[in-house]
Amino acid sequence: MLLVVRNLLKGWLLLVGVCAVLGGVGWLLGGYRGLSVFVFCGLLLALGTYWYSDRVALGMVGAKELLVGQAPALHSTVERLAARAGLAKPRLYVIADAHPRALVAGRGPRGAALVVSGGLVSMTTPAELEGVLAHELAHIRNRDLAVQTSVVVFAAALIETSRIGGFLQRALLFVLAPVSAALVHLMLSPRREFAADRVAAEICESPHGLADALLRLDQAGELVEFAANPATEPLYTIDPFGDDTLALMFKSHPPVAERIRRLRALDPDWREKLRAVA
């Protein structure tokens, strides 16, 4: 409950911050009249981002809607896990490439989209896939969704803005990348991933599917090439960018090894259970 309240407060903080920055610019340009006009524009911008950020995020990652008839088993799995989490089934999308990853985007529990890649579905075992899906559903239940999606869209827009600079592109990127990265780190704590991992373990009634999946995704990421806007890093289950210099500025995920350690600790007797089965 505390995490949900914190995320709601962050959403309001983002709204107030955007309006304050634009209001300051308006005050410098036109006094009270400029301030009121720019604050009004800020409110419209915030509303538009809140309402359309999921579509923008889905477009950035190249996701296409996955119909029930195309993957009935996957839809059934998502529906079952969502019911366990106490959520409505999110819309399901797919990214048609081999890099294994998943993400959620949207406004909240009633406006969520869950995205999986073809590589994730083909590369993971059923227990691992359920663990990853449950982790993403946990972000929806914890109300990470609206803040996470909006922040990523804002940060990605700043990075893309540098591309219009022509010969000034590198200078613009030098200025805008730290600003957008600071926004990401201000609004998105690594603790949200630990919290989502714990909830995913509860949904799956075991932490080991997700722990095994994190290990597999981390290893597979070293073998499959990946390229995207680095500001999208917070959306994914783990950081898919590796050692890319620009992407390191946006790194918001805790180390995979620490996440696995904490998940295994939720079932401290798992080694003994494994030996008993063997």
Image (tube, rainbow, N blue to C red):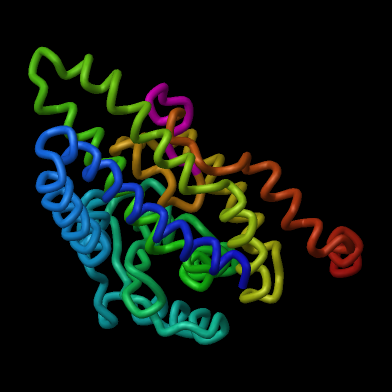
Residue drawn at point x = 18 percent, y = 61 percent: 48
Percent of width and height locating residue 238: 51, 47
**Magenta region includes residue 202:** no
- Observer-nearest of 136 and 120: 136
Number of marks in picture: 0
**Magenta region includes residue 241:** yes
Query: Quadrant of the rendered structure where residue 268 is?
Result: bottom right
Residue furthest to the front in view is 32
- Observer-nearest of 34 and 214: 34
Left or right, 147 with reference to 193: left
Placement of the N terminus among the 4 image quadrants: bottom right
Placement of the C terminus among the 4 image quadrants: bottom right
Percent of width and height locating residue 229: 29, 38
Residue drawn at point x = 11 percent, y = 22 percent: 165
| Up-down relation of residue 22 to residue 213 (above or below) | above
User: Magenta region, mostly helix, strand or loop?
Assistant: loop
Q: Which residues are magenta?
A: 239-247
Percent of width and height locating residue 211: 66, 56
Residue drawn at point x = 37 percent, y = 52 percent: 14
Left or right, 65 with reference to 122: left
Percent of width and height locating residue 161: 17, 33
| Up-down relation of residue 31 to residue 249 (above or below) | below
Residue drawn at point x = 57 percent, y = 48 percent: 216
